[in-house]
Each structure stands twice: as C-alpha cells, then as structure tokens.
Image (cartoon, helix red, strand yellow):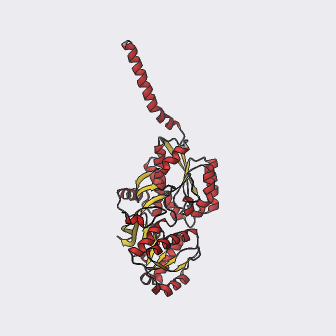
C-alpha cells in the first residue's frame, strides 16, 4: 500500500471520527427547545408561596442559561390559583396544546391529586414542588411522578421522636386543620412521639377556613397544665393568625409550641413578628444554613430578587435542578422517555438544604433541622439550632438515628 493511499485513508478515518463526535452536538442544536410547563398559584391564598417557588425555579434555570443537554429551554408558566379544577385545565393545555416535555410545580395536594391521572395517562413526567399527599408516592405512585419536597408526615416522623427525646415534651396536645394534609402530618408526629413513650393529651382539628382561633385557644388554656407542649401545624393566612393569637392569649409561656417549619415559614415572619420569636420548629431547609450551596443560593437569590429565599424558593430551585441534571444526562434527548425518566430518578446533587436524592418511590430524601425564630439585625429569621436527622425518607424510623 503506497504512502499516498495510506495518508488518504488516515484523513478519511480522522474525518469520520470528527463527524461521529460532532454529529450528536449538531443534532441537539438542531432540535427544538425543551418545553417545560411550570404550574404554580400566583393569585389567591397560596400566591406568596407560589411566587416564591416560581422565583426559585427561574433562578436555577437562569443560572444554567436556560439551556441543558445542548438544547434551549422554553418555560411556560401557568397560574393554577391553588384550585384543583383550574389545575386540571392548565395541565390539559400544557399537554395537548403546548406539548410540553416535562412539568413541575404545584403546591396544593388537592391539585396534585386532581391532575395525577392526567399526567400518568399523558406520559409526561412532573416534578411536584410541594403537594405532600402521601399516597402520590405510595399507592398512587407512577414512573411519571416525582416529588422534590416531602410526603406529608415525613419530617414529622423525626419531629415526634425529637420532641420526646430531646425537648423533654412527654405529654402533648395536637392541633391541626381538618383536612388530609393536617391529619397526615399529625398522625406521623403522633406515631413516633407515642412510640418513644409520649402521651397525647388531646387532638383538636379546626376547620381549614378558621381564622379566629379564640375558642380553641380558650380550650388550650384549660388544658395547659396537663401537657408539656403543643404541636400545631397551619399554613397560609391561618398560620399567621394562629401564631399572632397564640401570643395574644399568653400561651407561648404557658404551653411551649413545637411546629413544622410551615407554620413559621420565612415568608410569614414579617407578619408574625415578635409573636413568632422563640418558636422552635423543624424543617429540611433554612435561609441561615451554612452549607456552601446555600450560601451561594441565598446570595444569588438576594441579588436577583432583592429579598431572601423561603422554603418554597428553595423547593422551586430544586425542581429546576432535577430537570436540568436529567436533561444533561440524556444529552438533550428527551424523546427517549425511558432514559429521561431513569435519569431523573437517579439524580443526586448537593442542594442548598444538603444532599439530595430520591427514594425508590421518587420522593425526596433530606436532612431535618431544628430551627428557632429569632430577631437578627432587625429581621425575623429561622436560625439553625442543630440537625435532627440525616437522610429522612417517608418511612423514617428512629432506628436510623441510632445507627449513625
């Protein structure tokens, strides 16, 4: 074989190699944008929470240049108003008209339950940003449903154990709104609290619409000497009013309050003010966390929005990160739905809250922190006191603490 022919052959093989390397990139660049539908309430009682989640989601996307796996990302935001009937219409639009590749968001569990079959039948994956209905990642689980926040009661499993073993609360009164989420959270707290040796003196479940807690607080006053503390869970305007009225009735000293972070969410503190100071609570995230990822996140969020992030902000940020990493893993080939679903289920990364990954049912696993509301430099914040537990999943038991 002469040298001329060998040289030509070598150049030909090199050319083929270059084409093979470059072709996938060119194909990705020639593909249309990835369409992402984001569902969140922007008006109504959930508006503040929905806006925070939307801001966190957009921040993560902007940090990535609205691009992943060599493809641009087009975000289509829909306002669900926090209403199941509106959410179903918006999902139908996103799936049938906009033909989105993936969806994210949703705060209200009732919304998520309403759209569950739509999502599964359409075979369009969704990453739930809150929506804690336990059955969504259990008996109603699906390869198309992921949840970046929690299943109702997940953090409460650690909270109930902690109340008895670390806070010295041996007898508790339980107070929560009378809806699925309230009962699921209360039941989980009671489960580990009683298992540790605790006694529940009374359970009280006011209607969800309650804003005047006077009758319930009077009832608590009569029971205060029979208990070491009160576990209470409220959200939205109910959380603000409950904390204010609890303080007005002089109950903070008479019956110490221990609550999920939802009740004293960062977005409520400017309204709750001094009434919230001193309330111990537990949560998987806090603005004051000093993880490297959270320091960076808080700085970026503050620069972008001129305000500090809430728990919902971080949850929206996580939704976007999950999508971005999965799109990168499949190199922008979302058309291979099986590979994309597998990539999302295996996502692992250092989140602002700490290590993030999914359990086998595609529900988030996270650390749980003890927080304390304080006034720092003229601003009300949830300070981080300590870590209650690592790797808390929706089936958590105290045995996992003992093995550390």
Q: Position of residue 55 (x, y in %)?
A: 48, 57
Residue at 35 percent across and 70 percent down: it is 376
Q: Nearer the viewer, residue 61 or 28?
A: 28
Report whether 242 appears left or right of 6: right
Q: Position of residue 36 (x, y in %)?
A: 54, 49
Quadrant of the image occupied by residue 84: bottom right
Quadrant of the image occupied by residue 198: bottom left
Residue at 38 percent across and 16 percent down: it is 6
Q: Position of residue 105 (x, y in %)?
A: 53, 57
Report whether 66 appears left or right of 167: right
Can residue 307 be seen from the camera position used here?
no
Quarter of the image with the N terminus in it: top left
Q: Nearer the viewer, residue 50 or 163?
A: 163
Report whether 271 appears left or right of 122: left
Q: Is residue 67 above or below residue 301?
A: above
Q: Nearer the viewer, residue 395 or 20?
A: 395
Report whether 206 appears left or right of 324: right
Q: Nearer the viewer, residue 275 or 43?
A: 275
Can residue 351 be seen from the camera position used here?
yes
Q: How many marks?
A: 0
Q: Is residue 131 above or below residue 28?
A: below
Q: Position of residue 277 (x, y in %)?
A: 40, 75
Quarter of the image with the C terminus in it: bottom left
């Amino acid at each position: 074989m002469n040298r001329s022919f060998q040289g030509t052959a070598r150049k030909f093989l090199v050319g083929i190699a270059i084409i093979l390397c470059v072709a996938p990139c060119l194909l990705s660049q020639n593909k249309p944008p990835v369409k992402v539908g984001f569902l969140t309430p922007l008006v109504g009682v959930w508006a503040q929470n929905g806006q925070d989640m939307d801001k966190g989601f957009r921040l993560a996307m902007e940090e990535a240049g609205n691009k992943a796996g060599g493809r641009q990302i087009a975000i289509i935001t829909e306002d669900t108003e926090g209403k199941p009937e509106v959410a179903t219409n918006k999902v139908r639009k996103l799936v049938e008209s906009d033909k989105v590749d993936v969806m994210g968001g949703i705060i209200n569990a009732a919304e998520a339950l309403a759209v569950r079959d739509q999502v599964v039948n359409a075979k369009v994956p969704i990453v739930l940003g809150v929506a804690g209905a336990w059955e969504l990642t259990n008996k109603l689980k699906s390869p198309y449903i992921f949840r970046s926040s929690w299943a109702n009661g997940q953090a409460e499993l650690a909270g109930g154990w902690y109340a008895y073993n670390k806070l010295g609360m041996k007898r508790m009164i339980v107070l929560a709104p009378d809806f699925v989420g309230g009962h699921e959270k209360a039941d989980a707290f009671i489960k580990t609290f009683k298992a540790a040796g605790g006694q529940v003196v009374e359970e009280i479940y006011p209607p969800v619409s309650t804003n005047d807690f006077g009758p319930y607080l009077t009832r608590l006053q009569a029971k205060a000497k029979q208990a070491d503390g009160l576990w209470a869970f409220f959200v939205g305007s109910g959380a603000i009013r409950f904390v204010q009225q609890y303080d007005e009735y002089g109950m903070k000293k008479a019956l110490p309050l221990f609550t999920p972070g939802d009740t004293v969410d960062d977005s409520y503190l400017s309204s709750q003010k001094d009434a919230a100071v001193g309330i111990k609570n537990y949560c998987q995230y806090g603005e004051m966390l000093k993880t490297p990822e959270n320091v960076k996140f808080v700085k970026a969020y503050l620069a972008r929005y001129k305000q500090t992030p809430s728990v919902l902000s971080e949850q929206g940020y996580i939704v976007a990160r999950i999508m971005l990493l999965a799109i990168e893993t499949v190199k922008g080939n979302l058309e291979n739905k099986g590979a994309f679903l597998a990539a999302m289920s295996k996502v692992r990364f250092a989140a602002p809250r700490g290590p993030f990954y999914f359990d086998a049912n595609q529900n988030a696993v996270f650390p749980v922190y003890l927080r304390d509301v304080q006034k720092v430099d003229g601003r009300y914040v949830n300070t981080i006191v300590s870590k209650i537990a690592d790797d808390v999943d929706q089936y958590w038991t105290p045995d996992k603490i003992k093995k550390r």
